[in-house]
Amino acid sequence: MNIKIVVVEDEEDLLELIEYNLSKEGYEVIGILNTKTVQRMLIEEDVD
């Protein structure tokens, strides 16, 4: 499974938990702590 997911969460501990669980299920996860960098990341990365 090569599905890439972007998760935006401002609480670092919660973000790490979400990233861990999604990765464990086979997803490629990009975690972001703030919305300021999301637009640039979405342009640079090919996400599902």
Image: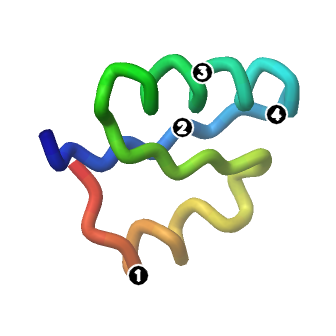
Instruction: Tell me the amino acid under the disc marked 3.
Output: Ile
Q: Is residue 10 left or right of residue 21?
A: right
Residue of label 4: 10
x, y percent for residue 9: 71, 32
Residue of label 1: 44
Q: Is residue 14 left or right of residue 38?
A: right
Residue of label 2: 7
Residue mark closest to the camera, 3 vs 1? 3
Instruction: Tell me the amino acid under the disc marked 2.
Output: Val
Look at the numbered disc 3 and give the secondary structure of its residue: helix
Contact, mark 3 vs mark 2 (Cβ under 8 Å): yes
Instruction: Tell me the amino acid under the disc marked 1.
Output: Glu
Look at the numbered disc 2 and give the secondary structure of its residue: strand
Q: CA distance from mark 4 to mark 3?
A: 12 Å
Tell which circle, 3 or 1, labels the residue nearer the N-terminal end.
3
x, y percent for residue 1: 13, 39
Tell which circle, 2 or 1, labels the residue nearer the N-terminal end.
2
Marking on residue 18: 3
- Against 30, residue 40 (above or below) is below
Instruction: Tell me the amino acid under the disc marked 4.
Output: Asp
Look at the numbered disc 1 and give the secondary structure of its residue: helix
Q: Residues within 10 Å of mark 4 (few under 14, many from 20)?
A: few
Q: Quadrant of residue 7?
A: top right
- Against 1, residue 38 (above or below) is below
